[in-house]
Amino acid sequence: MRTPLLLYGLAVVVRLALIALYPDAAYPDSYYYVEVARSLAAGHGLTVPFVWIMAEVGNVIPDPAVLPVPSNAHWLPLASFIQAPFIAVLGPTGFASALPLALISATAAPLTWLIARDAGSPRLVGTGAGVLAAIPAAGTVFMGQPENFALLLPLVAATLWLVARGLKGSAWSFALAGLLAGLASLARNDGVLLFGAVGLVWIGDRVRWWVAERRERRPAGSSAASDGGRTPVRRPVPVLAAAGAVVLFLLVMGPWWARQIAVFGSISPTSANGSALWIREISEWNSITAEPTMANFLAQGIGPIVASRVGGFVGAVANFAVVICSVVLLPLVVVGAWRRRRSIDFAPWFVYTAVVFAGATLIYPLHVPGGAFIHSAIGLAPYAYILALEGVLACVAAVARRRPTWSEASAGPVFVWATVLFTAATAIPFGLGTMEAWDAERQPRIALAAEMGRLGIPPDDRLLSIDAGGMHYWTGRPGVVTPNDPIGTIEDVARAYGTRWLVLERGSVAAALAPVLEGGPRPAWIGAPVFVVPAADAGAPRLALYPVCTAAGDTRCGP
């Protein structure tokens, strides 16, 4: 047991180092999960004091438009549930949010070692793949964030491992896979694709058995081998095991779906109203004026539809190649996958890989560039690392067969560890570069929070911004997102929610408001900026704060 413990220790150290280097949430997903967790810890339940995207309130201006709003109309709550008790004990700090998820994601390292051992991989492969799961290439930097990368990395891999064990005769393992698939689905909407893959594996196993049984019943003298030469047909996963998987999945998701129906009238509100599925471009995801219906989607014609689906597939491949494989592992994964193409141990991984790429291509291609695919695909990493290192050994063996001077036994470990160390090392430049980008966005927000305190802006003044969750995280002020709509619609949102301030950021700004940030004409309801973080290139400011005057008698926006 020393090796898995050492792997877990390595993974924990890596994650604690990431938290020490960047102890805060860094992007909208993370902000959201932290804010929901803090609300839970404070006793406010599943609510948030901001609207992070218009899709979460049905792509309309509610009447009345109130804050706070029920949370998790789109993003799911498991990451927040896990953070909440740590926040209650340690306080609302970045460390309290990140710590439990870091400890969970670290289990992927010993789990990878265990998967490799069960699959009959050489010990060298299992240990090396475990190190890669502890330092998962370019994706390592996300292991310190308080969101569901840390959950799906071990949950997806463990589910596929249990399904493989089920195929090899362990009925309880297959049933337990339903429980883990339920937890993955409670972490992300597209977690249900994992449960769908479990079902496809079961159906495929039944078909295999049915075909084999028919061949066994062929009469003597047929093309089938005689009875004495037949290999016994492997029994399929029992129906009872599949039923157990369904029951355990529903045990996890049933109560949550009941809550969603009670609060929103649907188990998946953003899918039911079409805002997640029938958009024609990603800007419609955060729009009031767009019409996310099937008819409107089909009206764009076959060309744009096919182009968006091709773009989703290409983006998914690029995400997988860069984030999981740091590019260098991709051809080795292909080699290893070819060698294991008939392996029972890897069959569930192949099925889920096909399902998750199909989802990125057909269901949510426009969300792929924003990271939707890699959240689901991160769970492919442990198996991919095993396949990559088996691919290394296969390449070494192929060369050794042609070069008698080579010693396969000596060269194999050298190339495996060289691959592991080089891939792990790519986490450093990618991670530091990513953290630098995060910090470039964080620093103006920290300055904004300090200036708002200096100006005496009340803590309940509402903000209009592109990242309402991030603004609440840094300033403590409630708010609402600026929709991707004409300036008149944005004004309607500002009036409905009684916002008092507008925050514009150069890195991300609604198109209709970009001219305001660039110093162009301002509508009468937006005043002159009271705080600006200038850009080094003397272009548009990195961040600017403007008064918003939608209430009678508010003179802050005068000449």
Image (spheres, rainbow, N blue to C red):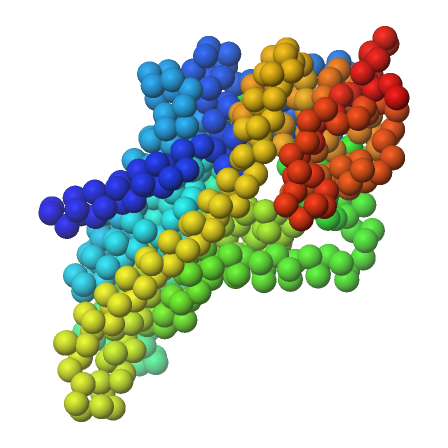
What x and y, as percent, mark residue 371? 54, 47
Residue 90 sits in quarter? top left
Determine if residue 297 is in view. Answer: yes
Number of labels in the image equals: 0
Q: Which residue is drawn at 30% across and 55% down?
A: 132
Query: In the shown orientation, is residue 285 left or right of residue 435?
Result: right
What x and y, as percent, mark residue 520? 84, 38
Query: In the shown orientation, is residue 129 left or right of residue 141?
Result: left
The answer to whether residue 535 is above or below residue 259 is below
* Foreground pick, 148 / 184: 148
Residue lying at the far top of the rendered structure: 553
* Foreground pick, 209 / 248: 248
Determine if residue 352 is in view. Answer: no
The answer to whether residue 405 is above or below residue 253 is below
Query: In the shown orientation, is residue 3 left or right of residue 386?
Result: left
Q: Residue at x 43, y 15 (%)?
A: 41
What x and y, as percent, mark residue 8? 22, 43
* Foreground pick, 526 / 266: 526
* Foreground pick, 64 / 527: 527
Q: Which residue is drawn at 38% across and 59% down?
A: 426
Residue lying at the far left of the rendered structure: 2
Query: In the shown orientation, is residue 296 left or right of residue 388?
Result: right
What x and y, as percent, mark residue 347? 36, 59
In the picture, the quarter occupied by the C terminus is: top right
Q: Residue at x 72, y 42 (%)?
A: 540
